[in-house]
Image: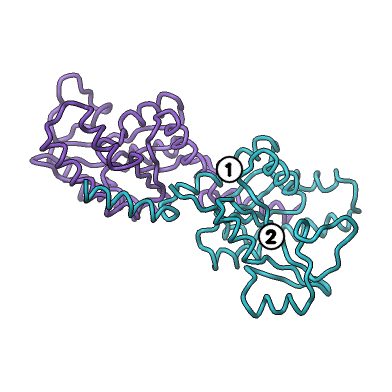
Chain colours: A cyan, B purple
């Protein structure tokens, strides 16, 4: 069967609980690797190159763009952020299922370039619950919360482009559901062409 | 989330262990229904109309063909066999995941008509194991076994048209794998369009 890793893109509304979900998934199973982004911003205290980010110069980043070394990238304020091919592809070759946590526009770009990638959209069971969670954090004022909800409504327009919808109601169930969702991909016929050719040859020569 | 059942087509080489697999799946989980075929052949002793088959006259069967009441059908020797729409669609509406156990040509027809259906191909871990199992049955002579192996080699040509490959090595693991494979489909974005529209509306009006 398929021994290469699966490429998984995870997106979701702010407040849907993606962060906790990823942390828990990586804690429970050792077949996952989280993609590390490259950025031109400076490391903050405690951040280590190659752990939180790959810290690169703007010159190097533009060079990566030119040489198509990035799966996708975007510019926020004055800094670039992007997903290097190399780390992702190496991890996949080593059999790791690689997770990219990126927003909707980046996700659709990845799918175009890697049709075998699966796109998972994480969401709360309903809009009221999303609002409740954002308020519950207690870290933002109502203006920020309302802006986030409007942003969620915008992002919701792209949900149909995703392969799977994952409802984060109870974190424990949700982690297991996500794990199953990804593991099932190893059985896709399109991920097992070498195995299929092999068994076909065997049957001819038996 | 999606409350309609999933349409599942299961095919596989003779000797791959499909029969035991289906029986075990239906025994363990109550969310499945096995599609019942219509046939023009006479009931054998112990067979009950609507349990093993729907027994119909040839006139009625041809009428079903004309009225497009069959998902797929075929003629073997002097009798017709086919899958009636009605039973399958009713069970799906009731939330049952409906399983059709049919061969490769029928499977591809179903996929064309119901693109949301998933096609699962069950196979042994390797060709030697297939041969071993066919011999192990002890019910057929070598001519029959070799004919089955040749037939398997032919069928193997269509495997790429399937969505998933399921290796039946240990029956217990295989049943669980099949169950997961099917259950994950309830989370496909394309199976949850109504839910997605609903949450989008909620987000607009919050």
Measured Cα–Cα span from mark 2 to mark 1: 24 Å
Badge nearest the viewer, 2 or 1: 2
For residue B175, the mark is none
Task: Let me know if residue A185 appears in the view.
Answer: yes
Estimate the x, y position of residue A119 in percent, counting from the top left: 59, 56
Q: Position of residue A29 (x, y in %)?
A: 64, 40
Q: Which mark is residue A102?
A: 2
In the rendered image, residue B191, in percent from the top left (x then y), is placed at 51, 49
Secondary-structure class at tag 1: loop
Above or below B69: residue B177: above
- The residue positioned farthest toward the left in the image shown: B78
In the structure shown, which secondary structural element does the residue marked by tag 2 occupy?
loop
Q: Which is more toward the observer, B8 or B138?
A: B138
**Mark 2 in CB contact with mark 1 (< 8 angstroms):** no
The residue that appears at 17% across and 40% down in the rendered structure is B60
- Chain letter of disc 1 in the image: B
Check chain identity for marks 2 and 1: say if they share one.
no
Residue at 39% over, 40% down: B167
> Residue A195: x, y in percent?
38, 51
Q: Is A133 above or below relative to B113?
A: above
- Residue A59 is left or right of residue A178, and the answer is right
Which numbered marker is on residue B1?
A: 1
Q: Which chain carries label 2?
A: A
Residue sitting at 37 percent across and 36 percent down? B168
Task: Left or right? Give the position of A55 relative to A8.
Answer: right
Residue B193 visible here? no
């Amino acid at each position: 069967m398929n021994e290469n890793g699966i490429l998984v893109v995870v997106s979701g509304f702010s407040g849907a609980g993606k962060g906790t979900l990823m942390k828990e998934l990586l804690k429970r199973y050792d077949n996952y690797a989280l993609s590390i982004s490259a950025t031109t911003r400076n490391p903050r205290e405690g951040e280590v190159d190659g752990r939180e980010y790959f810290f690169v110069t703007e010159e190097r980043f533009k060079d990566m763009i030119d040489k198509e070394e990035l799966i996708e990238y975007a510019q926020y304020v004055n800094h670039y952020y992007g997903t290097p091919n190399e780390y992702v592809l190496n991890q996949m070759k080593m059999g790791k299922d690689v997770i990219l946590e990126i927003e909707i526009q980046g996700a659709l770009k990845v799918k175009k370039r890697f049709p075998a990638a699966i796109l998972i959209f994480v969401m709360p069971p309903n809009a009221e619950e999303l609002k409740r969670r954002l308020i519950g954090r207690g870290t933002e004022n109502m203006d920020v919360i309302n802006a986030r909800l409007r942003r969620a409504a915008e992002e919701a327009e792209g949900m149909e482009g995703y392969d799977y919808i994952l409802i984060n109601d109870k974190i424990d169930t949700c982690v297991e559901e996500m794990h199953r969702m990804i593991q099932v991909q190893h059985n896709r016929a399109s991920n097992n062409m070498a195995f299929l050719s092999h068994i076909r040859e065997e049957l001819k020569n038996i």
